[in-house]
Amino acid sequence: MHIEIDEISKSFGTTAALHPVSLAIPSGALVALLGPSGSGKTTLLRILGGLEFPTSGRVLFDGQDATGLSVQDRRAGFVFQSYALFRHMTVFDNIAYGLNARPRASRPTRAEIARRVTRLLDLIQLPDIGARYPSQLSGGQRQRVALARALAIEPRMLLLDEPFGALDAKVRKELRQGLRDIHDTTGLTTVFVTHDQEEAMELADLVVVMSMGRIEQIGKPQDIRARPSTPFVREFITA
Amino acid sequence: MSDVTLGKPARFRAATEESPATRWALIAVAFAGLAVLVFAPLVAVFVEALADGVAASLSSLASPDARDAIRLTLTIAAISVPLNAIFGIAAAWFITKFDFRGKAFLITLIDLPFSVSPVVAGLCIVLMFGTNSLVGGWLVANGYPIVFAMPGIILATMFVTFPFVARELIPVMIEQGRAEEEAAQTLGASGWRTFWTVTLPNIRWALLYGVLLCNARAMGEFGAVAVVSGKIRGETATMPTTIEMLYQEYLSVAAFSLAAVLALLALLTLLLKTALELRHADQLAATHRH
Amino acid sequence: MPGLGLSMGITLTMLSLVVLLPIGALLLKGANFGLAGIWDTVNRERVWSALFLSFRLSLFAALFNLVFGVLLAWVLVRYRFPGRRILDAAVDLPFALPTAVAGISLTALYAPNGAFGQLAAEIGWKIAYTQWGIFIALVFVGLPFVTRTVQPVVEEIEREVEEASATLGASRLHTIRHVILPMLTPAALTGFALSLARAVGEYGSVIFIAGNIPLVTEIAPLLIIIQLEEFNYDAAAAIGIAMLFISFAMLLVINLIQVWSRRRIGYV
């Protein structure tokens, strides 16, 4: 799905979290929103997901104005920084949640749901943990479950907020590759937020460097590295 | 190519909010429910007290029964609350400054009075200290009656208000830890000095909070005192039992006027309680932080 | 750390003198009486009636407080509106108001000539001096428990969990039913049990509005007092032990809820 961000701005009271920014995300791309805290990257991600409403500007999905679309209708799979798993539900029920939440008319049968959940558990390489509770999982496992849960609803795009933030270095490396693999398998347009420039450069097709609510530079990782276009980018991207 | 600034469409709602209609409906139900269940009885006390005018109400408070009752209630509170406060401090010190097994069990024992019906509490004291018990019989014979006398009422009041101070102090002192007291020790301070100059200042708001609740309950206790006191006019009739007596003698204004005094005390307690929660939340038990 | 001897001494002495020994006296009396004796006393229609009445009406009152209490907790924590602080403080009034004051006040309100009693009479509904009166008094005394135990939990609900539910396509109602309410359940149940325990033993608030007709509106605590006034210490003790047993059972239930909840979802 092709995403277009058209002069989106967001102010909280008198503070401008996002100055008008524009961005075109090609269908199927893996995009990193890269920047320090306060750069507005998470705000932009949440606007894409419908969790915030922009003060001005439009968001277009495949050319259609989706700015006013409710969260429920967006079909944007969202993975939160804290994973936000439902602690009182098993892993299986967590992943099946989106499917079970559909109105009766469009809900798949229990057997079908079970099938899909099993397939997703295989995809995230954790086939045996369906009956466990989130409190019994490690950080890396929870992240993967959150990913599977978002994928279960067959989203049009995948949005991830600092997906590797709370994990240690070794786990992070494994999960990075996991995300890349899942992206390549599903072909979904994926946008993730990070402050880790090495991560952004290694994973993404397209990197959007942000600072203080503005986009500093957009480009392929190697292009940004070779030709940083502003002093900020030069400082932020170490060799 | 942007349009003129869009306002939120009238229908935008954050993912974590209900519709305005739902919200206001729930707020209305909350108000209505509390108005009927809580505010109405409170208002009724004063309406009934002032049914014959302010003068009648005030003069009923000057009657001997009322004056004796007020005096007795104040005396009982003046004795039981400090005693329970001392217990609370001692128990909190014991539990939080030392390590031993069975702490949870001890805390459960301390909390027992909360689970016991006040009437059963009074019953226990009557059985233990009444004339037909070993202990009680001996005490009465030697001129120290417990039941149907002040000591019994004080014991009964202490029973029902026993945990209040302790359970306010224990979580706070756990949270504050032992480091400051240990530091004072290394600097050569004696135990008492440490307590007065280091611990007490840290727990004073929690202590005040606990004493406040303890006092409100002590002055208002009815069931346990009704069993233990014999309700002897002028001698063992506290404010609550006097209210009962006046009410049953159809002296409505007198009963409600005395009740209004207790209601005012309750409101004052709530006021001070809220003030403490707002100003010193960091030094109160976690459940009181708003 | 100094003060072990003194603090332990005061703690254990006062605990024994004020709480443990009196309760022990009751249990001792019961032991002397024997289990059979207790059963005989309790197993009379009037006693069963009183115990069932106390328990049944307390259950209904606690259920009402469960629903209303959760609603109150939600409204107080999540919404901002004028008068919120007053509402919040009002929830504590049943804690602070002496039971006798509440008792005569509720009776004045719901008696046939009272403000609410009159309204009810118009539809032929008698409240004071019936079981309805007892029910309302028990709702009053139990009101704060559910709200106060649930409020902290509502405050700590992570917004992201609600947002996650919405991103997965769930309607707000679905989110509330399947995500939020389950998170509140342990605290709500604890509050329910506390409310129930309080109501079963309640005396002062109920005694005026109840009517006190044996087998119909006579509550268990009153029965104990009547036995005492007639010097039937054994009977009083028997009923007292029955009530103590109910209290301890409730305590156990509350603790089990907390243990179960901690193990299952990692918090209370």
Image (spheres, rainbow, N blue to C red):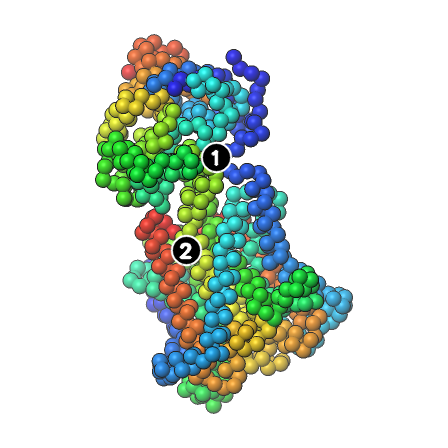
Residue occupied by mark 1: B15
- Mark 2 nearby-residue class (10 Å; few <14, some 14–19, many ≥20): some
Using the rendered view, name the quadrant where residue C246 is placed: bottom left
Dot label at residue B233: none
Q: Is residue C111 above or below residue C70?
A: below
Badge 2: chain ID: B
Q: In terms of sequence position, does the residue under pointer 2 or pointer 1 come before the other? A: 1
Task: Work out whether residue C79 can be spotted.
Answer: yes
Residue A41: image x %, image y %? Answer: 42, 24
What kind of element bears circle 2?
Answer: helix
Residue occupying the point 61% across, 71% down: C129
Work out whether residue C267 or residue A210 is closer to the camera in this orientation and state it.
C267
Task: Work out whether residue A168 can be spotted.
Answer: no
| Inter-mark Cα distance, 2 to 1 | 36 Å
Name the image quarter holding the N terminus of chain C. Answer: bottom left
Please state the total of marks drawn on the protein image: 2
What kind of element bears circle 1?
Answer: loop
Residue occupying the point 41% across, 55% down: B171
- Mark 1 nearby-residue class (10 Å; few <14, some 14–19, many ≥20): many
Dot label at residue B171: 2
Residue occupying the point 32% across, 10% down: A223
Residue flagged by tag 2: what amino acid is it? Pro
Q: Is residue A163 left or right of residue B9?
A: left
